[in-house]
Amino acid sequence: MTIWKPSLDDSSIHLAVEGSCGGTTLGLQIARQVIEDGGRVLWAAPELPDGVRFSQIFSEISLTASSRFHAMNLVGNVDQAIDSLLKSAKILPGVTLVVLDDYCPDSGAIPSDVIKAVNKLISDTSWTTLLISKGGTSMDSSPLVARGKNKLNADKVWLLTRPESDSKRILWMDENELKLRLKEEGFVV
């Protein structure tokens, strides 16, 4: 089994996840991939990723390389937080990934001020932007709904689901289904 590595093309990705299925882990794995490729990552979230999980995912990355991972607390006024993130991304050299994890409430409609701020970030970037949030319940046969899908200007919508209570996950990228398994070192194919 090999670690899954998506192709990144400076687009914006809206990743909607089922609760506790590994959305932050997937984001960390993509961050590790970017750092391995020589890029820099900005991570913004209300809480920093779990330290144990971070060290598992980044275990093969040198201390020097891991210094290209910059974390910011995403708290307070969302406009100011996104502006600060945007300024940091433009000042730091070699930023190739910006991650917004848990940037909106876990349920219900995404507030309009959050949508406006996130769309501003997406429109003003030259790197891959990964937006991670909890998905919603589907009213049809699809496994999950990406809340705000029609209001966020993301280029791609991915859905991460946990069909069973084991380590198997399914990542839906557009209409393509990718079966993954969550291991200590990250998602493998």
Image: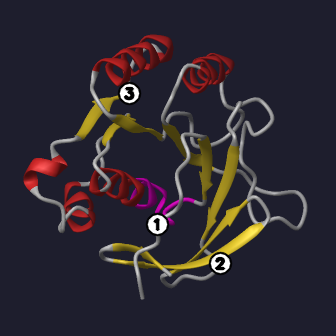
Quadrant of res 93: top left
Label whose residue precedes the other's in the sequence (1 or 3):
1
Q: Which residue position is annotated with label 3?
A: 74
Q: Nearer the viewer, residue 28 or 144?
A: 28
The image's colour scheme reads secondary structure
Label whose residue precedes the other's in the sequence (1 or 2):
1
Residue 3 rendering spot, x and y as whole percentages: 40, 75
Q: Nearer the viewer, mark 1 or mark 3?
A: 1
Q: Which residue position is annotated with label 1?
A: 5
Question: Could you tell me which secondary element the residue under label 3 belongs to?
Answer: loop
Amino acid type shown at disc 2: Pro
Give the CA separation, mark 3 to mark 2.
30 Å
Q: Residue furthest right?
A: 140
Name the quarter where the N terminus is drawn: bottom left
Q: Which residues are magenta?
A: 19-27
- Magenta-span inclusion, residue 21: yes
Q: Which residue position is annotated with label 2?
A: 163
Amino acid type shown at disc 1: Lys
Residue 149 rendering spot, x and y as whole percentages: 75, 40
Q: In the shown orientation, is residue 123 left or right of residue 24? A: right
Give the CA separation, mark 1 to mark 3.
26 Å
- Magenta-span inclusion, residue 69: no
Label whose residue precedes the other's in the sequence (3 or 2):
3
Residue 174 rendering spot, x and y as whole percentages: 76, 58
Question: Could you tell me which secondary element the residue under label 1 belongs to?
Answer: loop
